[in-house]
Image (cartoon, rainbow, N blue to C red):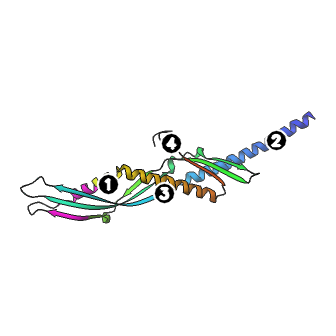
Amino acid sequence: MRKKTVQWLWMLLAVLLLQSCHKSEEESAWQHKIKQVAELGTVQYTVQKIVSNSDETWQILGDRKIIVSIRAVIKAGIDMDKFDAESVRISEDKKKHTKSVSLELPQPEMLSYNIKPGDVKVLYNKVSFLRSEYKVEEREAIVAKGEWELKHDKELTEMILKDARLYAGVFMEMLLRQNGFTDVKITFKQEGKNGKQ
C-alpha cells in the first residue's frame, strides 16, 4: 500500500512538472512575441509652429523681420527595447475556460520630430532697403529654434504622451485578446522604477 502511494505521488509530481514546463514554454513564447514588437508607434501628430525673428539692431539702416511656418510630424509611443519580457505572466483556468495574461509596459516617450524642407514656409519677410536678406544659415537657425520650442513644449508633450499611453494599452489588449486571452491586465512601469524613464 505504501509503495503504491509513493508511486502515485511520483506520477502526480511528474504531471505537475510537465504542466509547469508547458506553461513556462508558453510564457516564454509570448514573452518573445511581445518583445519582437520593436516599437509601438501609437500616436502621430502633425503640428504647426509659427516662429518669428525681428532684427532691429541697426536703427539707422532699418530693420528686417521674418515669420516662418513650420509643419512638424511628431511620433510618440513605446520603445519595446526597454520592455522586460519577464513581466509577462500567463495563467489558465480550464474549468472556467479562461486564459489570463498580465504585463508591464515601459512608459511612452517621444520617438521623433520630423520636419521636411517642404514643410517650412516663409509667411512674411520684410527687409529694409539698406539691410541684407536673411541668409540660409540664419533661416536654419530660426527653424532650429522652432523645433527646440516644440520639443520643450511641456503641455504639448504631456498631451501626446497621455494619448500614446492610452492607445498603447488598447493596441496591446486587442492583440492579446485576438490571440485567445480572455483576461488581460496591462500596467505601465512607474517613473524612476528600475532606472530613469
- Tell me which amino acid carries mark 3: Thr
The quadrant of the image that shows the N terminus is: top right
- Residue 13 appears anywhere in the view: yes
Q: Earlier in the sequence, mark 2 or mark 1?
A: 2
Going from N to C along the chain, the mark reached first, 1 or 4, is 1
Residue marked by disc 1: 147
From mark 1 to mark 4, how far is it between C-alphas? 29 Å
Task: Report crowding for label 2: few under 14, some 14 to 19, many 20 or more residues within 10 A (C-alpha).
Answer: few
Total numbered circles = 4
Location of mark 3 (residue) = 42
Q: Rate crowding at label 3 as few (under 14), some (14 to 19) or many (20 or more) other CA atoms within 10 Å.
A: many
Question: 26 left or right of 10?
Answer: left
The outermost residue toward the top is 2
The reply to whether residue 38 is visible in this rendering is no
Q: Nearer the viewer, mark 1 or mark 4?
A: 4
In the rendered structure, which segment of residues is drawn in magenta? 122-144
x then y, percent, for residue 59: 8, 54
Mark 4 lies on residue: 190
At label 2, the amino acid type is Leu
- Disc marking residue 175: none
| Residue ID at (68%, 46%) | 24
Identity of the residue drawn at 46% across and 52% down: 162
**How many angstroms separate mark 3 from mark 1 (CA)?**
21 Å
Per the model, the C-alpha gap separating discs 4 and 2 is 41 Å
Disc nearest the viewer among 2 and 1: 1
- The amino acid at mark 4 is Gln
Q: Secondary structure at mark 4?
A: loop
Please name which of the two marks, 4 or 2, marks the residue nearer to the observer. 4
Q: Earlier in the sequence, mark 3 or mark 1?
A: 3
Q: Residue at x 16, y 63 (%)?
A: 126
Q: Are marks 3 and 1 in contact (CB under 8 Å)?
A: no
Q: Are marks 3 and 4 in contact (CB under 8 Å)?
A: no
